[in-house]
Image (cartoon, rainbow, N blue to C red):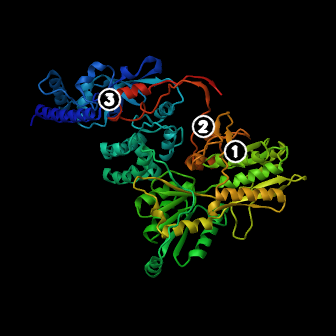
Amino acid sequence: MSERTNAIEQYRAALRAGQKYYNDCQAKGISPYPRVLEEIYNESMSAARVDMGIIDIPTDSIVGTLASGRKAAFAGNFMPILPMMTEFSDKWINLCTAHLGTEGITDPIVCLEYMGRFYVQEGHKRVSVLKSFGAPTITAHVTRIIPTWSEAENVRAYYEFMDFYKLSGIYQMIFRRVGCYAKLQKLLGFEPDHVWTDDERADFLFMHYHFREVCDEHILESVGNRGRSDIILECLEIYPYDELKKLSSSEIRKRVMTVLPDLKFYAEDEPVAVSTEPEIPEKSIVSKLFDGITKPRLKIAFIYVDTPDNSPWTRGHDDGRKALEESMGSEISVHTYVVSKENASEIMEQAVSKEGVQLMFVTAPTLIAYARKVAAMHPGLMVLVCALTVPFAGVRTYYSRIYEAKFIAGAIAGAMSGDHPIGYIARYPILGVPAAVNAFALGARMVNPNARVLLKWSCLEGNHLEVLKSQGVAIVSGHPAVNQLTSDGSIGWNTSRFSANGRLEPLTSDFWDWGRMYEQIVRGVMNGGWKAFDMSKASAVSYWWGMNSGVIDVVLSDIVPSGVAQLASILRNGLIDGTIKPFECVIRDQAGMIRNDGEERFMPEEIMNINWLCDNVEGHIPNLEELLPMARETTQLLALKPYTAPRETESVNETENSISGEASTPDETDAEVRDAIRTVEVEKTV
């Protein structure tokens, strides 16, 4: 068969693909043509233009044309829609014939790049021919249009991309979310400012090619507006890069399928299913008798990052494990493992495949990636990670509503501080911590309207206790940070007052009763409670129990006055029976924004994700760059959403989510894109 005959057949195949795309788009009521840059962009949106020279660009990111006059010959996927025996088809076939010859297509196209997407100025048919053959890249002379800066997340993410491009030299990874490029560098094992070598670039692009083969249209549609870049990043969070870059396409597909539930969860924006109290279904007497005769012991693993002797945190969990075994020893079989990052995956896998573990408690959030991996490889395995609502479909999380105990501690501090400010030393700026700080501050203000809370962070440089002492605080909370009852009954006090001689005298301690929590979770699992949540829609589940479950409480020292102790008892009972809710009152944040007018009820997810501070708190929530190195990993894993201060005047012109990303999807119309391109104009920040 001659090259021209092959080219004719190639046009017919491309024409069928173009017509199918065209018809599908028309059936959905969206534009079937390539996007037109001139219709969605004007020069006022540009901060500058940069000549990038001649480079190889990903064909998947070529989404449109510069001017509308060239779009009528192509469907939105750049496949032809004009019939055979036209001047256009003859030119397309001639070009294809040349491509099939010895020389191929060598002339670069000319295009403009805006927000990571490419719009063709010259060479539309070259793009069409090469796309029809599935070429991963096309040589192009590129002019980059730098968008005007705004606080819109996709614009901020694009500015991060420009820094990333200087390091990597690739266009294949485009993210809409802030922070993804820094995360990618870290997951690849690179320092933040590491410039990629040619070999490193080649290795990554080879892996990317396999992901491109695997992540077909069906998979991309299933994860909504998440593209290949997000899928790759999600896989890298679970599987080491050194492993992924050696795999074939079929092996990559297996890894991709394990992360799809989480990506679908993100794409569909499903809420986290929050369990706020234990639900232990009762079984009939006959079922209990039958289980007692036939049911084997439930095999449970506890995963620690340190030994109980070295870590108070691990000791609290291990005491809980001992209490669980004491209570349910005849029904369960328990194994404990101390792991490091180097052997966590191997040990977790052995626990399941060799020891037959069915339920796994992972006691540190830094092990979330390894927990997700073992859960993905063993779909029947029940995995829980001790962290506050890390929303992954493959694992569940468990934690306690520590803010309830902090509310009582704040009330005690407010009652005993007089006219002095109150100190608070928080640990990490992560999910749940601002809620605890605010609950403490609200408790203090409830009994002392003039109470001021001076906030410090143990993850920052400095002797914070001495600083607070010099600022005249009478009471300080959060020091030392030991928050559980120990096996010998001793208590790590974390709210104390300064005595006349400057020493700390203990007042209260909040603590977790991990044994009670573990017992209730395990009994729920054994009685069918694990299946009470419908996981068919890939919902993430978080167990977030409080005082009404007996898993969190406050103990008082003998020096707390009887009247104050009586107040604490009233508050504790109110929290247990639900008549007292710390956040159901008038609340203003530090910027003066009303967060609650006193009539609203905060949902659990809203409390978990509080990222602001009450107006009687003096201090700030530090960003990642301010933290000591040892605090950064945990903070990144459980990061708060960025806080945006309220603005006095602000136009609605803000760039939304349809400009950045990878290739356009069929459900994004030109009108939607045009409507989405808007610029933030801030006159004054309050």
Of label 2 and label 3, which has the lower sequence position?
A: 3
* Amino acid beneath label 1: Leu
Reply above or below: 372 against 674. below
Q: Position of residue 208 (x, y in %)?
A: 37, 43
Label 3 – label 1 distance at C-alpha = 48 Å
Image quadrant containing the N terminus: top left
The residue sitting at 36% across, 28% down in the picture is: 118
Give the Cα distance between marks 2 and 3: 41 Å
Q: Is residue 437 left or right of residue 64?
A: right
Which residue lies most toward the bottom here? 293
Image position of 357 with respect to 653: above or below: below
Whether residue 54 is visible here, answered yes or no, is no
Q: Where 559 sits versus 283, above or below?
A: above
Local crowd size for mark 1, using a 10 Å CA cut-off: few (<14), some (14–19), many (≥20): some
Decide: is 95 above or below 340.
above
Viewer-proximal residue among 602 and 319: 602
Say the numbered circle drawn on residue 139.
3
**Mark number displayed over residue 460:** 1
Image disc number at residue 643: 2
